[in-house]
Amino acid sequence: MKEFDMADERRFAGIEAGGTKFVCALATADGRTLARERIGTADPALTLSQTLEFFGRAGREHGAPTAAGIASFGPLDLDPASPAYGRIVSTPKPGWSDVNILAAVRDGLGVPTRIDTDVNAAAMAEGRHGAAKGCHTHAYVTVGTGIGVGLVAGGRSLIARGHAEMGHIPVPRAPGDDFTGVCSYHGDCLEGMASGPAMAARWGCPAQDLVPDHPAWAMQAHYVAALCCTLIYTVRPDRIVIGGGVFEQPSLHAHVRRMLEPMLAGYGLSPHERDLHTLIVAPGLVETPPGLLGALELARQAADG
């Protein structure tokens, strides 16, 4: 990816579109935020009109955006050949299924616009500014209300006809674990066994209320390590960045490394992959939402074609 050009006077519109809030920002090409606003996610017509109104005000004060990027909740149709490209195809968020968020922003602002999942955008931001800077291929894992995985190679997310749904892969059960899982589709998939709601259902309280030496953390580490094992043997990432609300527990990254080592058993690993301390890391971006930074990177890509 290009480094910031201080002589580049373009303006970029970034939108981190979440089920609870839209975070919108107008930024310069050198990364300075000129205006930013939080908009509560209500019905689509109201939320999107407020989003466009923000960029209208910000553009009149600071200069109109050249391009826009959207890091959105989903699931999304990300196949450019699909008639539903840019749509939120199905979501429990009332009123948002089948909303074409890409078209609304692109047509409303009249500029080139790109869309990707919030987790893919966060992965791009970690690659450009955070813990995966300098990596060619990396994964960003978020473990919270759900489990999402963003995959990036050469500064762009890996998208074929859709985005990765690795939160729903089957995983080997931890020894002695008879929990049925909470996923309404698959029961005991990764998200069903290791998301924040799964931890609350399994242990009877939210993850943040569990003490550091609670057995929950070793079990949690088992399932995330199983995901990392799958990523290592399929994608071969230079780095796996793991964040999200559940991973605010300081010891959990170390737990994952300890669980992962015997799963890999040393098979077929490069010297880099054997060093789990540099392969499995915490996010580097903690002050600015990585999804918003990723949305601005999508805007840059849209402007550059």
Image (cartoon, helix red, strand yellow):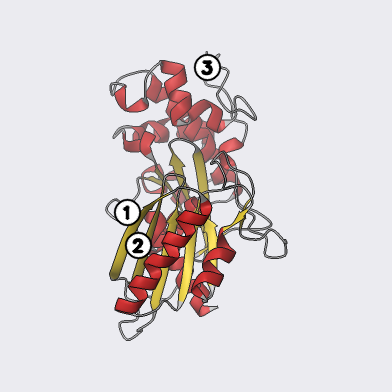
The residue wearing badge 3 is 175
| Looking at the image, residue 32 lies above or below residue 185 | below
Report how far apart the C-alphas of labels 1 and 2 lie in the structure: 8 Å
As drawn, is 50 to the left or to the right of 85?
left
Q: Earlier in the sequence, mark 2 or mark 3?
A: 2
Amino acid at circle 1 = Leu
Q: Nearer the viewer, mark 1 or mark 3?
A: 1
Rendered residue at 63%/58% (across/down): 78
Amino acid at circle 3 = Pro
Residue 27 in which image quadrant: bottom left
Secondary structure of the residue carrying numbered label 2: helix
| Residue 241 horizontal/vertical position (percent) | 41, 48
Q: Nearer the viewer, mark 2 or mark 3?
A: 2
The residue wearing badge 1 is 285
Q: Earlier in the sequence, mark 1 or mark 3?
A: 3
Residue 237 shows up from this direction: no
| Looking at the image, residue 166 lies above or below residue 292 | above
Secondary structure of the residue carrying numbered label 3: loop
In the rendered structure, are the residues bearing label 1 and label 2 in contact, judged by CB atoms less than 8 Å apart?
yes
Residue 283 shows up from this direction: yes
The residue wearing badge 2 is 129
251 and 287: which one is in front? 287
In the rendered structure, are the residues bearing label 1 and label 3 in contact, judged by CB atoms less than 8 Å apart?
no
Residue farthest to the front, as pictured: 46
Name the disc covering residue 93, or none: none
Residue 134 in which image quadrant: bottom left
Q: Earlier in the sequence, mark 1 or mark 2?
A: 2
As drawn, is 173 to the left or to the right of 279?
right
| Residue 20 horizontal/vertical position (percent) | 42, 44
In the rendered structure, are the residues bearing label 2 and label 3 in contact, judged by CB atoms less than 8 Å apart?
no
22 and 228: which one is in front? 22
